[in-house]
Image (cartoon, rainbow, N blue to C red):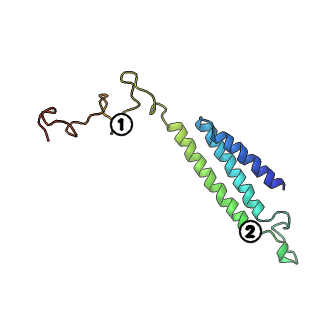
Amino acid sequence: MTLAVTAGLLVAGAVYLFLQREMLRVILGFVLLGHAVNLALMAAGGTSRRAAPFGSPEELSAVADPLPQAFVLTAIVIAFSITVFMLVLAVTGREDDTTEDDTTGEVGTGPDRPAGGSDAVPGVGTDPAADGGRR
């Protein structure tokens, strides 16, 4: 019961942090969610009805199942690598990608939108005489 309550609290904290706008809080929410998943995987292994995973008991049904432990170890490695990747993206990311241009009032420039501020692409849907007769 304690593992279920703890995992639920971690998921609630993770959802709260996911709803924030800052990238660092989203990453911390991901870390909390990773811990909650690890606790849920360990709870799936039946921690209350199993003995210690080591030793040589006479009854083999009391030995802890190694499969959830292997899943948790794999989940730890995956969560750590994704967390590091997200931290690198947060550090190297640029915030000016979505800023509004002061001169034209348009958001950003890219391959779809010319830097001059006009949405019209020469030669597409215009009169041939208007773009100098080029086709």
Foreground of the two, 93 or 10: 10
> As shown in the figure, which amino acid type bears the numbered disc 2?
Pro
**Circles 1 and 2: CB atoms closer than 8 Å:** no
Q: Please tell me whether mark 1 or mark 2 is closer to you in this view.
A: 1
Residue under the point 36% across and 24% down: 104
Query: Which quadrant would the C terminus be assigned to in this image?
Result: top left
Foreground of the two, 28 or 70: 28
Which mark identifies residue 110? 1
Q: Does 55 sit left or right of 41 as displayed?
A: right
In this rendering, is residue 122 above or below 53? above
Mark 2 secondary-structure assignment: helix
Query: Which quadrant would the N terminus be assigned to in this image?
Result: bottom right
- Residue 66 picture location, percent across and down: 74, 68
Residue under the point 60% across and 47% down: 83
Which mark identifies residue 66? 2
Residue farthest to the right? 58
Residue 114 sits in quarter: top left
In this rendering, is residue 71 above or below 81? below
Nearest to N terminus: mark 1 or mark 2: 2
Residue under the point 63% across and 56% down: 77
Neighbourhood count class around disc 1 (C-alpha, 10 Å): few under 14, some 14–19, many 20 upward:
few
> As shown in the figure, which amino acid type bears the numbered disc 1?
Gly
Residue under the point 55% across and 47% down: 85
